[in-house]
């Protein structure tokens, strides 16, 4: 039933092509961004989960 409904829609075959193009463009942009980062930024991002100091002045009640 779903197959018949989708086949009856005009121009439905273009949507998989459009989604593939969108995915490829976004993937390419993210790869270019990731490879163009400075080493200092990457090192700073690596240490974020390990930082225990709170700079906002917030405290955690334990």
Image (tube, rainbow, N blue to C red):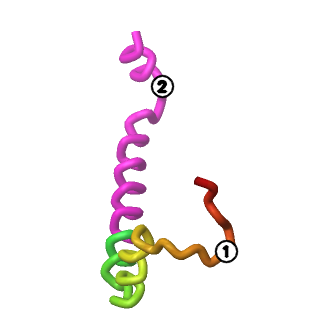
Crowding near the residue tagged with mark 2, few <14, some 14–19, many ≥20 C-alpha atoms within 10 Å: few
Q: Quadrant of the N terminus?
A: top left
Crowding near the residue tagged with mark 1, few <14, some 14–19, many ≥20 C-alpha atoms within 10 Å: few
Q: Residue at x 41, y 63 (%)?
A: 26
Image spot of residue 45 (x, y percent): 41, 76
10 shown above or below 35: above
Rounded to the nearest angstrom, the CA distance separating label 1 from label 2 is 55 Å
Image spot of residue 27 (x, y percent): 35, 63
40 shown above or below 27: below
Horizontally, residue 57 falls left or right of residue 49, namely: right
| The residue positioned farthest toward the right in the image shown | 57
Q: Quadrant of residue 46?
A: bottom left
Q: Residue at x 36, y 81 (%)?
A: 42
In this rendered view, identify the residue nearer to me: 25 or 42.
Answer: 42
Secondary structure found at label 1 = loop
Helix, strand or loop: magenta stretch: helix
Residue at the disc numbered 2: 9
Indicate yes or no whether the magenta region holds residue 50. no
Q: Residue at x 67, y 67 (%)?
A: 58
Indicate yes or no whether the magenta region holds residue 11. yes
The stretch of residues the image draws in magenta is 1-29
| The residue positioned farthest toward the front in the image shown | 62
Q: Count numbered badges in the picture.
A: 2
Residue at the disc numbered 1: 56
């Amino acid at each position: 039933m779903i197959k018949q409904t989708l086949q009856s829609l005009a121009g439905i075959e273009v949507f998989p092509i459009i989604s593939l193009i969108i995915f490829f463009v976004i993937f390419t942009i993210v790869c270019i961004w990731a490879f163009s980062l400075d080493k200092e930024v990457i090192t700073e991002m690596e240490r974020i989960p390990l930082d225990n100091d709170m700079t906002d002045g917030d405290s955690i009640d334990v």
